[in-house]
Amino acid sequence: VFEQPDLNALMALGKDAWLECLAAIDGIEPPQLRASGATLSEVELEARLPFAASDFVDFYASRHHAARAGQLMRPGAQLPEAWPFLPLGYHSRASSIIASGEPVRRPWGQFVLQNGPSGDRPTYAPTRKLDFELELGFVVGTPSDGGPVSPERAMDHVFGIVLLNDWSARDIQALEGRPLGPFLGKAFATSISNWVVPLEALKTRRVPIEPQTPPPLPHLLGAEPAMSFDLELTAQIVTARSPEPQILCRTNARHLYWSMEQHVAHLTSGGARLRTGDLLGTGTISGPEPDARACMLELSENGERPVLLAGGDERGYLHDGDEVIISGEGLGTLRNRILAASPEVATP
Ligand code: CA
């Protein structure tokens, strides 16, 4: 399995093999590092995906994000009725997943331009509201057979965690999203870190989840207390004007309302099968504090209050040439730069 171009074959072997592998490589230094005396971060590495993604589901597991983003996209909106009962999510596209280091091209799409020449009619143009979303992704190793996976068994199926940026075009999303949810507004790029950190390596970072009120139904509640991860996460921006990274937000995975185990239990509770390489996004990990808002939609209140940056720069949404860097304690970094939209498509 180590001769394969990605981790899928190793991930498919199951938890006993993962633990055996971790024990065997513990303390081994790659020879090229030992020879040069460099650290891993100093060696030139090729940007590539660590596994081949089978399916991609994105959840909505931060109550802070769901409440704020819901209000900003649809003023007056309450949390969806189902929100406290199950982890809401949607099926996205595995083909949108790209590696850290790959550029993100500004997408074209349909949206209504406020005070534009078309009035209330949509226009087809490059998005004016390009956004990032700071998330974690859970990577499935062991497949399931269509039966429900209980919260107690979920960790047998999840191999590890990646940093995830769910790139979003808010204007495209706003027009197309009702009632079926995001479609092309999130189908152009989702970037993940080049490393999958095994769950086993994060065992000491588990902390009790914030109280769930009302308690979930028994098949999601499980027999053991639901746990989150105490992992500090940051998003930074590098602009053309300021090459030094500037902090956009600081948050923590402990703010998630639903646990990883509950996501897996919910996804499989109706008969969906897990496949090796499935990627389960947590949704934007916003916290309660103002600087823990983990996307531009929340940070700039949908562009109404631009974020002030060094040198007089400001951002409502992201500009071409901006680079977004997401970092997590023990999880490495994930960075992608924005490319200008493709030239206008010739229309008859
Ligand atoms: Ca998302």
Image (spheres, rainbow, N blue to C red):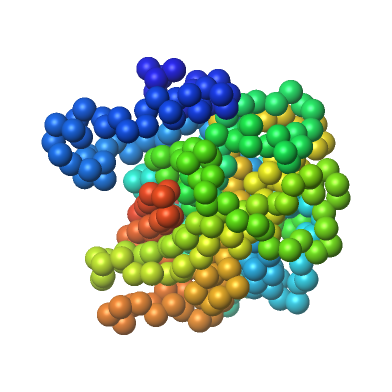
Does residue 190 appear in this view? no
Relative to the observer, which residue lies in front, 189 or 278?
A: 278
Residue at image coords 75%, 34%:
149
Does residue 335 appear in this view? yes
Residue at image coords 42%, 44%:
193
Q: Position of residue 15 (x, y in %)?
A: 57, 27
Q: Position of residue 272 (x, y in %)?
A: 75, 32
Image position of 268 (left or right of 27): right
In the image, residue 238 above or below residue 144: below
Residue at image coords 44%, 77%:
307
Q: Position of residue 240 (x, y in %)?
A: 27, 66
Q: Position of residue 279 (x, y in %)?
A: 58, 39
Image position of 41 (left or right of 12): left
In the image, residue 213 above or below residue 145: below
Image position of 94 (left or right of 221): left
Count up the numbered dots: 0
**The N terminus sits in image quarter:** top left
Relative to the observer, which residue lies in front, 20 or 261?
A: 20
Relative to the observer, which residue lies in front, 35 or 164?
A: 35
Question: Farthest left residue?
Answer: 36
Residue at image coords 43%, 28%:
23
In the image, residue 272 above or below residue 310: above
In the image, residue 76 above or below residue 111: below
